[in-house]
Amino acid sequence: MAKSKNDIKKVVLAYSGGLDTSIIIPWLKENYNNCEVIAVSGDVGQGTELDGLEEKAIKTGASKLYIEDLKEEFIQDYVIPTVQAGAIYENRYMLGTSFARPIIAKRIAEIAIKEGADAICHGCTGKGNDQVRFELAIKAFAPEMHIIAPWREWDIKSRDQEIDYAEAHNIPLKINRETNYSKDKNIWHLSHEGLDLEDPANEPQYEKKGFLEMGVSPIDAPDKPTYVTIHFEKGVPTAIQQARRRERYRSC
């Protein structure tokens, strides 16, 4: 249900503490009549990214922060069915970011209803699929809720301009202009985009500090291969066994 800015007094924000949502809190207060902002973070296994999030959210203008532990539900109801189905986007792209969005949006909608919020806000760009994933899930659980998508409203055009806004408002960031990748992490994966990755002709900078988080560069990896065996029952991974092979295959 569409509402005017004057009618919006309380907003629930899907909050990761990344660049987009870090600046959205003060932006909402500036552009929506100093509305109350309640931040919600869904813990789907992003680990240390949640450290210090409450202090940061409140310091930048939120009235409170919910950190919802969604890991078990995410694994059981989203990850495992995806593995069982062998689901791959357009037959070539492994799911990682996309299938975590509905569970996060569902919990945000539930909290917005409980809090009596006037609107839900997200930080998805105005050109990608993420906005659709979030908004359709929100509409399924809170069909009357107004949705605010700053990327479809504000004059900011790039992540560099977002950093400018953050610096002007003294908002602490974990990245800088040289490490300004857009990342999405959960218990299943970590995706990167931005900077040099925008040009597919560029070679990945595996040696660049902060580029890899869940593994090491092939250059730094051990020379001897490690073999991993995963045991499945009815399409569900139930056990893992790791063994290092000491001898390489000999060439014929």
Image (tube, helix red, strand yellow):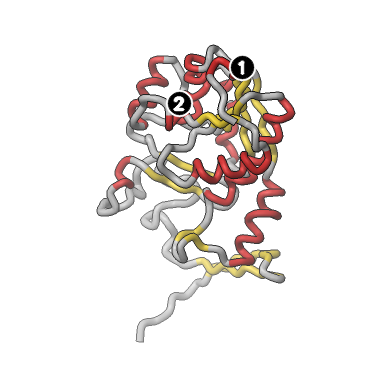
Q: Position of residue 240 (x, y in %)?
A: 65, 64
> In the image, what residue type sits under mark 2?
Leu
Asked if residue 157 is positioned above or below residue 241 in the image, the reply reads above
Mark 2: secondary structure: loop
Which residue, as the protein is rendered here, is positioned at the far bottom?
Answer: 252
The picture quadrant where one finds residue 239 is bottom right
Tell me what residue is drawn at x 59 percent, y 17 percent: 7
Which residue is the site of mark 2?
A: 173
Q: Is residue 179 visible?
A: yes
Q: Provide residue 103's location: percent of width, then percent of height.
A: 64, 45
Residue 170 to residue 189: above or below: above
Q: Nearer the viewer, residue 6 or 86?
A: 6
Which residue is painted at 66% across and 32% down in the image?
A: 67
The foreground one among 171 and 162 is: 162
| Marks 2, 1: nearer the viewer | 1
Left or right, 8 with respect to 30, comes to right
Dot 1, crowdedness within 10 Å: few (<14), some or many (≥20)? some
User: At x 71% / y 71%, what residue is drawn?
Assistant: 234
Where residue 9 is drawn, which disc sits there?
1
